[in-house]
Amino acid sequence: MPMLPEITGLTFMPKSHQYILQQGSVSLQLPSVTQLIRFISSEFYNQIDPVTLHKAADRGTRVHETVELIDKDIWTPIDNDITGYIQAYQSWKRDYQPEIVATEWRGYHRTMLYAGTMDKIVRLPNQGEDMAIVDIKTSSTYIPFLVDVQLAGYAQMIESWPGMKIDSTWGLQLKPDGSYKFHRTQELNRMKTYFNMCYALHGAVQREKEA
């Protein structure tokens, strides 16, 4: 399995959720994968109450943080309201025996200059996959199309680096009752096309704003 590329010069600013790439004396603000696919996500989430979205985002953040510590074999207390999600994650690990290559891996596309942070890059021996991206979701509603386009952006980002090839991408839906569903992206190349449409539309909007 090839080694992941060493990313230098990329800084993530969590409060503003901005990615800054330093290239020599030039600083570039890169759009994120989630920012680029806003044209799709807004269609699904604009009708949801903002308070509900905020609570879900907070819960999701705590699940991600706890899962990261678990993968690093660091003991951490688990909040009562996320216990089921953590149990679901541990069940998935028992069932699929993933080899964790990287967790919360941050990178950017070498030529298209967008950035993102992937939840998990793993090897799935029992699926015959040498390099797979796994995105963890804790929302009650799982939207395959939206998740798959997001994952396609990540896959394309890694594959912009020499020698990199993503075998598959997956959405891991954790549920509060301790169960999970593991969704494999179908037609990844088609999803990359949709992601690139979002990328092109974002570029057109930015050029109009700057005109």
Image: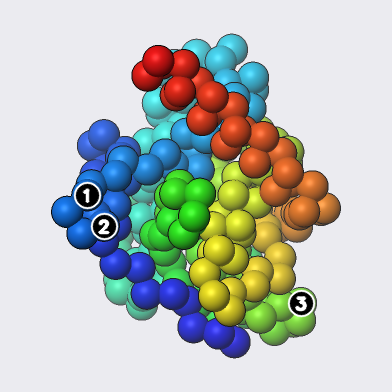
Residue extending furthest toward the bottom: 1
Depth check, front residue: 12 or 111 = 111
Tell which tag, 3 or 1, sits nearer the viewer. 1
Q: Report the residue at 59% width, 49% height from top.
A: 153
Location of residue 161 with respect to 211 vertically, above or below = below
The three-letter amino acid code for the residue at tag 1 is Val
Depth check, front residue: 87 or 195 = 195
- The residue that disc 2 covers is 23
- In percent of width and height, residue 136 lies at 55, 52
The three-letter amino acid code for the residue at tag 2 is Gln
- The residue that disc 1 covers is 26
Which disc is residue 138 wearing? Answer: none
Location of residue 198 with respect to 74 vertically, above or below = above
Q: Secondary structure at mark 2?
A: strand
Side of 90 where 26 appears, left or right = left
- The residue that disc 3 covers is 127
Instruction: Work out which quarter of the rendered image holds the N terminus and state it.
Output: bottom right
